[in-house]
Image: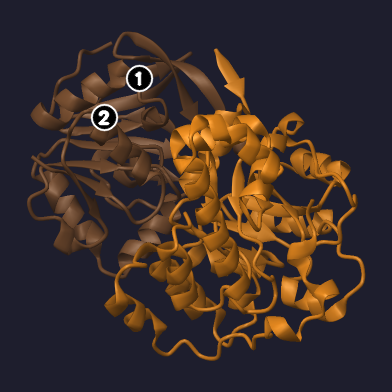
Amino acid sequence: MKTGVLALQGSFYDHVQSLELIGQDYVLIKDTADLPGVNSLILPGGESTSMIKIQENNDLFSGLKKLIESGIPTLGTCAGLILLAKDVIDGETSLGVLNTVVERNAYGRQNQSFEGLVDLMGNKEMYCFIRAPKILSYEDSVSPIATIENDVVGVIENNIVGLSFHPELTNDNLYLDWLSSFLKDGVNVRSL
Amino acid sequence: MKIESTFKIKKGLAEMLKGGVIMDVVNAEQAVIAEKSGAVAVMALERIPADIRAEGGVARMSSVETIQEVIDSVSIPVMAKARIGHFVEAQMLESLGIDFIDESEVLTPADDKNHIYKHDIKTPFVNGATDIGEACRRIGEGAAMIRTKGEAGTGNVIEAVKHMRSMTDGINKIKTSDQNELMSLAKEIRAPFDVVKDIHELGKLPVVNFAAGGIATPADAALMMQLGCDGVFVGSGIFKSGDPKERAEAIVIATTNYNDPEKLIEVSKNLGEPMVGINIDDLDEAEKLAKRGW
């Protein structure tokens, strides 16, 4: 069992740290050649425009998209959520596998970035929102799993989870326990 | 409950820039080229360092119009420079909604003894450092990101390499010291004790460390990444070269694939002329920007 961590740019080493804490094997993904043997995926935070540009060089995303569509557990945080989303306001649709509409940088610029108390599957924890994308809407096949005040900030659709924030910068036990079972079994989420 | 601009949030943005390239730009047109080439952020400047060096005079914060033009033209983070110690320029940049402030030796210092107290400003700061002591002092003042102080505007990577090697040596020294030795070591390198203690516990700097100054080719970027930098700033190297767009893209790909020589060869083909460099030995001591910073 090996988790692939997209490593074109961004906070991928922070996700690696989470995986080390739960004893999960991983491989960094920069090229299509890194994909064989991967049976779960993490798409990290960073700049989505930059990641999309870098992968054009080797067309990594077509292989990645096929892999996600094969049903393996896939987690995207912040920029990772933007890569997954079917519709992106003020940005480009890339993988387009999660039936949501997200708006880039919709919580404001860096000066408006914040730590906020998120209800993640019934538990509350402070998480970082950094120039975060907003989930504007989602289709019926998508369920909310995280909220802050009145906003949905995390969703799941089959094998795919997208979060606006950065649990990998907090690495609390709730998140790590969830991550561990999600990467192994896929869907393992209590609804709100 | 929401709390804005905590140190974790400031540091967090720098974490998101890792593995990326931050490019100097002087107008909207260059900013758009940088974004389309895959830059993770742009640095909005009035003049690029090579021109500041050539033209001389007092170099100050960029005009509000230039900064606003760049902010309006791209969706990636925008950085801008304030003079060393010029906390009012920093307050103005904060008010303009800049995403990161570079308290930079490339501009003429405004204070010959003090840097800005950065904790009081919502916007995160990046500061240059030639060695571990300087890095610790800047982190103590509130810097959320560190970069090398390679000689800007020279297209010569030697100083950035020197700083990165010195930083790694300094970190290793702190890491391997007995905890009883830390105070004495802090005194020796003129560093705040708390930051030294953090480095001892973490085994690395508590903030991200980028390469900056003199990076002109994809190979330069890959060299700095292999030396352990978290990402690179490219200043004059892109828009002073023959084909800025091609070179910008090549440096971005090289920064991701820094360990892959075949990839480096592929992106280094047909790049056109690199910027003309300056030998560091040809600079007067007074012309060395890295000496600015206390």
Classify residue B144 by image quadrant. Answer: top right
Q: Secondary structure at mark 2?
A: helix
Q: Secondary structure at mark 1?
A: loop
- Choose between B164 and B15: the one closer to the eye: B164
Residue annotated with mark 1: A172
Residue at the spot 55% in from the left edge and 51% down from the top edge:
B170
**In which quadrant will I find the N terminus of chain B?**
top right
Q: What chain does mark 1 sit on?
A: A
* Kind of residue at disc 2: Leu
* Marks 2 and 1 in Cβ contact (< 8 Å): no
Instruction: Say if residue B221 shows up in the picture.
Output: yes
Q: Could you tell me residue A110's position as x and y percent?
A: 61, 38
Q: Could you tell me residue B10's position as x and y percent?
A: 59, 36
Residue at the spot 17% in from the left edge and 58% down from the top edge:
A34
Give the mark nearer the N terminus: 2 vs 1. Answer: 2
Chain A is which colour?
brown
Q: Could you tell me residue A84's position as x and y percent?
A: 29, 43
Q: What chain does mark 2 sit on?
A: A
The crowd level at tag 2 (other Cα within 10 Å; few <14, some 14-19, many 20+) is: few
* Circle number at residue A21: 2
Residue at the spot 51% in from the left edge and 90% down from the top edge:
B272
Q: How far is disc 2 from disc 1 in space, using C-alphas?
A: 11 Å
Relative to A48, is A112 on the left or the right?
right
Residue A12 sits above or below residue B2 on the image: below
* Number of numbered tags placed on the structure image: 2
Q: Could you tell me residue B24's position as x and y percent?
A: 65, 65
* Kind of residue at disc 1: Asp
Q: Which chain is orange?
A: B
- Choose between A55 and A90: the one closer to the eye: A55
Classify residue B281 by image quadrant. Answer: bottom right
